[in-house]
Amino acid sequence: MGALSASVIGSNRRKTSRQVGLTKKELVGQLQKLKEKIKRIPTVKDLIEASAQKETASYTVFRERFKTWNNALWEAGLTDKKVEIQRYTEMELVADVKKANSILGHAPTTGDMDRLRKKGKLKVGSLGSFYWRFKNWKNVLKAAGLK
């Protein structure tokens, strides 16, 4: 097998592990199955947990294909209408992470952020905003100077 063939096979393996090659229809099916499993409309956190269990594609794949979490939910028939998601600046997102760090006394986890958000202690409405801007939680903490 030539170097090019080995390279193509290797890249296909990486794509398969993230489920990059799935169609929008297949991704919509994954969201609908996840909703049936958890008995409510899935959040980004639900998707991340399901992806870790290899039940769905990664959040990155959904974001690449649908551009926003709300678009994915809308196309899966899980929301009534397409709603414009509020975009937060990098500075606003970092400020929320730093505020959470100050409240908790340690770098916040996504679970910490979700709990503080639900208590009304943070400005940002969902974790999806962080993932949209920074791609993963490690990058969020890095941008806030916490890792």
Image (cartoon, rainbow, N blue to C red):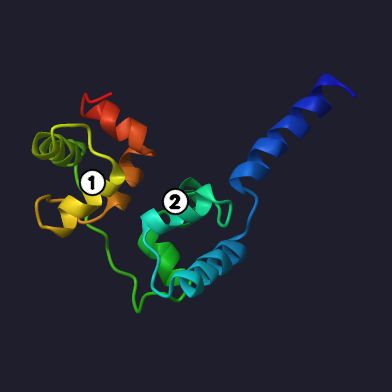
Q: Residue at x 69, y 33 (%)?
A: 11
- Percent of width and height locating residue 44: 38, 56
Label ID, residue 90: none
Task: Read off the residue under disc 1.
Answer: 112
| Quadrant for the N terminus in the image | top right
Q: Which residue is mark 2?
A: 48
Q: Horizontal and vertical percent for residue 142?
A: 28, 26
- Quadrant holding the C terminus: top left
36 versus 50 height, above or below: below
Q: Is residue 137 visible?
A: yes
Give whichever of discs 1 and 2 has the lower sequence position: 2
Mark 1, residues whose alpha carbon is within 10 Å: few (<14), some, or many (≥20)?
A: some
Q: CA distance from mark 1 to mark 2?
A: 15 Å
User: Horizontal placement of 82 versus 145: left or right?
Assistant: right
- SS category of the residue bearing label 2: helix
- Count the marks: how many? 2
The residue furthest top is 3
Q: Is residue 19 above or below residue 79?
A: above
Residue at 9%, 39% (x, y): give it.
103
Residue for point 21% across, 24% down:
145
Q: In this rendered view, identify the residue nearer to me: 6 or 52.
A: 52
Q: In the displayed orientation, state which residue is furthest to the bottom.
A: 80
**For the residues carrying marks 1 and 2, which lies nearer the camera in this image?**
1
Name the foreground residue: 115 vs 4: 115
Residue 68 seen from this side: no
Residue contact between numbered discs 1 and 2, judged by CB atoms under 8 Å: no
- Please name whichever residue, 99 or 10, is drawn nearer the observer in this view of the structure: 99
In the figure, is residue 58 to the left or right of 110? right
